[in-house]
Image (cartoon, rainbow, N blue to C red):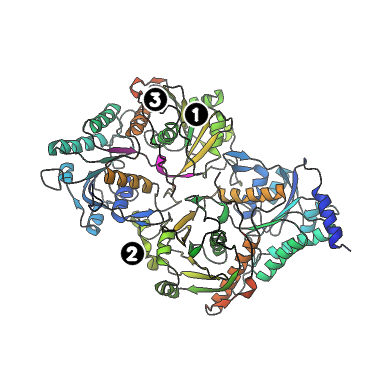
Amino acid sequence: MSNLVRPKLAAIVTAYFKYSHAQHIVDRLLDGYGWNGTHHYPPMDVVSLYVDQVGANGLSRERASRHPGMKIYPTIAEALTAGGSKLAVDGVVIVGEHGNYPRNERGQTKYPRYEFFEQVVKVFRDSGRAVPAFSDKHLSWNWEWARKMYDTSREMRFAFMAGSSLPVTWRTPSVEMPLGARIGEALCLCYGGVDSYDFHGLETVQCMVERRRGGETGVEWIQAYRGDKFWEALREGVWPKPLMDAALCRSHTLVPARAGFNHVFPTVEDMRRLVKDPVAYRYRHTDGLKCTVLMMNGLVRDFNFAAYVNGRSQPWSTQMYLPMPDGRTTLADFFSPQVNHCETMYLTGKAPFPLERTLLTTGLTAAGVESLFRGQTRYQTPHLAIRYQPAKESTFWRT
Amino acid sequence: MLTRRSFLQTTTLAAAAPASQPKRIAIVATVYRYLSHAQHMGDRFLVGYPYGGAWHKPDMKVVSLYVDQKPEGDLSGDRAREFGFQVYPTISEALRCGGKELAVDAVLTIAEHGNYPRNEKGQTLYPRYEFFEQCVKVFEQDGRAVPVYNDKHLSYSFEKAKSMVDASRRLRFPMLAGSSLPVTWRLPAIDLPLGCKIEEALMVGVGGSDAMDFHALEGLQCMVERRRGGETGVRAVQLLEGDAVWKAGDEGRYSKALLTSALSRSDTPLGLTVEDGRTQDLVASGQLRTLAKKPAAYFIEYRDGLKATMLMLDGAIKDFNFAARLSGVPRTQSTQFLLTPEPNVTYSACLMHKVEQMIESGAAPYPVDRTLLVSGMLESCLTSKVQDHARLETPHLNVRYKAPQQSQFAQE
């Protein structure tokens, strides 16, 4: 694609209101964002928008009025064809997060990412042409559908990127897992709920451990621990407490366990008092690596990673720093590197990091939910025998 | 009478004392209550702090505390009981732990917060110099001096600040001072290359005078001091307010490209972002002028010709960002000084780690002259403010020093 041609994009979103993912992502394409020390205006145009749920607080009309080049269409097909009969865009942005969608008996929100994707692909097929696509967060709540999305993108040979902003945001410290490292164990200590931030925790771990010697080999089983079983597992040393401690030492938001102190290291008793509903996902990769994601609402409000690397007894650790507009900031700028990677894909036709990562973390999220649903029993995951090699270049935010 | 020679001999002897004992620390503070500087800094030496991915407990013991004021919420008594030290009624008693001679290995003077009068320039008259003088008096009387950390600027007065630094040189004790901005995390994690040629530098900050402008000026100074030739001091300053700030920008007194660059690092634009979440190019859209209703520009003319500007932009953003244009480097250098959220304020752990380093090694990791110069820059800017925003020559700010070879911001 010539650099002189500005790619045309279609945005397909569930809802577009303040601080919804669609607003964070599509706004950056429309209004630009701080990047590499300037206000960067993406060299591409969002020409069509589909919004599945337009509420009273919706911003799509305001955005369309300020950006008349972007038309709102009532269907996904029309958005992709710009009202014509054939695909009329060079890239697709799917944001199926936020909005009112039912939950299933497992507690998963049935965001219509797969349904959106299928409609996009139908236009690709009908037009005999496919273009790069991005789908925000996990591919689908439903593993079979996620797998089908992956397979379709491979079969039709279009660049497809998905996932969380956690792998691509700032890190404090700004460090990368050495490519080919030997990893003994890995852990993410974070916050948030099941079928939501657990995905971010899993992506935090996966973007690091995929860089280990031999690359990714897939996951054999996962087991969830919640409430009392979490505390029991902690006591029994199911996951290494030193990794948990290291992760806590990377947090900028550790809730003080004692009144009058702004920053104290919590005892396990403190944690029990502060965290009412802890959840852990522990899983084993095919090559034997064990990883853990701890969701400890009430203790921290950030994503912290720790691992044993290259035989060292001291944990290696960092924080995936999210400037979070929950009072701390006003912009969720962790979407900036994600959007920037999307831009690269739309310009080059190549995804900057493997879709297999998100396929695996999508499967892990669903499998973690399944283990919880099955009474926190170990859940075998032969379907997650997903092998891939990581991108050689680091893709997190450093500039 | 203590001679310089006998003083130095005693200092040398003191330095040779066995190192196996934990270092003893006195804290001299204005107030010690929740989220005051004294609390979140002093507590690091009581309960430890995170460093390098581990909970680090300094091999040091707080043995005495002096607090000048005990407002509601005072924690000094609680801390003393829990951690086994004494609160003394005077600074000299705190430094001598109630005995006859200096009985500590280091002093932290943390004189921020508390109820102190302001002068006509709007400076809060925190008694940093007065606290320091009392410490120095004990050092002189007892023939031994120990490392001193002074939180934030040395004094609201350059003259007083200068005499503090002179005392530390005369009595040869290491001294560290200043803000946590220079040592906190940066987004991105960059420093200016040592010896670079800076064409222009700009800092944006918020929070008013004279508390947060000091932080912003130190953020600026810790970057520009790395330029070729090192720091040579400041020739003149000027502070403008209101529309004059925008007019100065229109006239090219500061680069709007650099301003855009610094603001591109902000995660906290206000106005339309707060309204509906959108990103903003604040300079190009003109929103900056609408949002920052009471802007202030601090113009710093260095003796070697470098011009730098610090803009206080309350109402437009809520964070501290820097940008500079270097000779021969096409892209501007810019970064955010990350002020991590309350209550952890982990940036203060970054700073206390530097204090600990000084106490352990007997050498300050970066020169106190930086804080001396910034104290003087700030005072002169605030003088300009009350003298009709006049440009003021500052021959007294002939402060020369070399930046540390090693970057000092949080990277581990």
Mark number for residue A217? 3
For residue B288, which quarter of the picture? bottom left
Residue plotted at (59% across, 62% down): B230
Secondary structure of the residue carrying numbered label 1: strand
For residue A210, which quarter of the picture? top left
Q: Residues within 10 Å of mark 2 (few under 14, many from 20)?
A: few
Q: Pick the residue in front: A245 or A148.
A: A148
Label 1 sits on residue: A183
Left or right, residue B257 beside residue B233: left
Q: Pick the residue in front: B316 or A103.
A: B316
- Amino acid type of the residue tagged 1 in the rendering: Ile
- Chain label for disc 3: A
- Amino acid type of the residue tagged 3 in the rendering: Thr
Rendered location of residue A154, percent (x, y) = 25, 31
Q: Is B196 located above or below residue B252 in the figure?
A: above
Left or right, residue B364 beside residue A236: right
Q: Residues within 10 Å of mark 3 (few under 14, many from 20)?
A: some
Viewer-nearest of labels 3 and 2? 3
Secondary structure of the residue carrying numbered label 3: loop
Which quadrant of the figure contains the N terminus of chain B?
bottom right
Label 2 sits on residue: B285
Rendered location of residue B334, percent (x, y) = 46, 57
- Amino acid type of the residue tagged 2 in the rendering: Ser
The magenta stretch spans residue A252: no
Q: Read off the magenta span.
A: A158-174
Secondary structure of the residue carrying numbered label 2: helix
- Chain label for disc 1: A
For the residues beneath circles 3 and 2, the answer to whether they share a chain is no
Q: Is A266 located above or below residue B164 in the figure?
A: above
